[in-house]
Amino acid sequence: MVTARDAPARQGEFEELIRDLRVDLFRYAFWLCRDGALADDLVQEALVRGWRAFDSLKERNAAKQWLLTILRREHARHYERKRLETVDIDGLARSQEALLARTQRPEVEDMRNAIFRLSDDYREPLVLQVLMGYSTKEIADVMNLTQGAVLTRLSRARKMLREALGDADTRASTG
Amino acid sequence: MECLEFRRLCGSDPHNEDPAFVAHAESCSHCATFARETRAFDTVILEALKVEPAHPTVMPAAILGEEASQPRQAFWRPVRWLGLAASVVLVAGLAAGIWVGTSSDTLARDVVEHIHHEPKSLVTTDVSVRSEDIYRVMNRAGYRLRDDVALVTYTRTCVFRGHKVPHLVIQGRQGPITVMLLPEIDVARTISVDQDGFVGTIVPFDEGSLAVVGEPGEDLDMMTAQLVDGIERSK
């Protein structure tokens, strides 16, 4: 049982643990749900749940994967409640314009928009690999897929992005 | 390894360290160029993925409960206005990061402190947030806000004293007005807020309370009345 005397040390440990993870958690949440406000909510919820279950985290260096799993579960819970069946990609893109456009470089902005338009099946493994540094085995564990399926999705994701950016270059040169 | 297989693997993981993959890149200049271009492409992907949060990411103290960040001896300081049994419960509650009781002075102070933690909420603007965001934040607390009550320019679920509460900003004549719905923090009477240039009130609302804080000179009584009338339990 945690006593009041243990509480400050435990809180300090949790605070230190999440200090470096907070921004990456937001980024992962954002690319999962493509909604800045919802991503903020999901991160807060994941941190609250993580704090409550902190004693169950045995390996402190597994904290990132642990919090990501909590966040991912929270995201799934959110969509179960909403029971979304279709997603208006253009509607989402318009509402997130400000967040997506915060860059000085047009090629990065184009890439952001292209990633935004990828479906969940291709976007999530790409985010886990490139942003979070996960191996294909770790991605397979998170997404409950075979490694082969992960490899295929990653390859197709990059191919779709190249095609989308090829279209963007064409529009830019003829517009 | 053949070139086709190399390029397929490279497309899945351009930083592949498999010895056969590395050996092929060293022996085939076309595939080596393909790998370099794919890694450069990934550099742009990585930069694109690094979006920045619009709001400051919530600080741990706000999650753990404001009191959790106080020095350890504060947990043991007697709270004279509570009975001994309630003090024991309060201390146990603090260990869990949840407020059980509240002092009216500290509630007003804590509301203003919370506003200070979210400076980006205090923007004078005529751009409203999305209605689905307002719905989600309010619904999470079990409430809804009628559409015609006010122009809402900021909305977020915040952790305040260990509780998740709706935090809205509406636009008044003098500037932004902070509205915090505190369903699990009840107050026995209306509390005045007058701190750091902010003025307002915290009123009993339903089974909890409602904080409405703005700039001096704002008709906050009228705004509070509109909000009390315009916030209802969601079905």
Image (cartoon, rainbow, N blue to C red):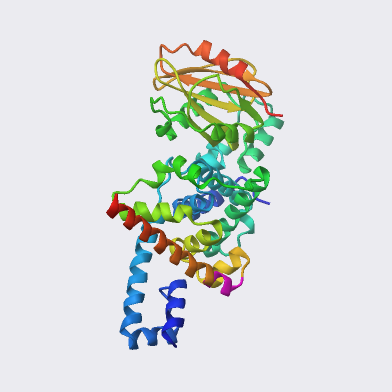
Question: Along the line of sight, which residue is nearer the eye, A119 or B226?
Answer: A119
Q: Position of residue B185 (x, y in %)?
A: 63, 27
Question: Which span of residues is magenta-colored?
Answer: A146-151
In the image, residue B26 sits, relative to residue B77, either above or below, namely below
Image vertical order of residue B38 relative to residue B53, above or below: below
Q: In the picture provided, is A135 more to the left or to the right than A83? A: left
Q: Is residue B77 among the parts visible in the rendering?
A: no
A84 within the magenta span:
no
List x then y, in percent, for residue B59.
Answer: 48, 43
Q: Quadrant of residue A170?
A: bottom left
| Residue at image point 43% right, 87% down | B2
Residue shown at the point (68%, 28%) measured from the top left: B234
Q: Is residue B145 left or right of residue B29?
A: right
Q: Nearer the viewer, residue B25 or A138?
A: B25
Above or below, A137 relative to A54: below
Residue at 44 percent across and 72 percent down: it is B11
Q: Position of residue B51 (x, y in %)?
A: 40, 50
Q: How many marks?
A: 0
Where is residue A39? Give x, y as percent: 52, 46
Q: Nearer the viewer, residue A168 or B89?
A: A168
Res. B129 visible in picture = yes
Viewer-nearest residue: B141 or B85 = B141
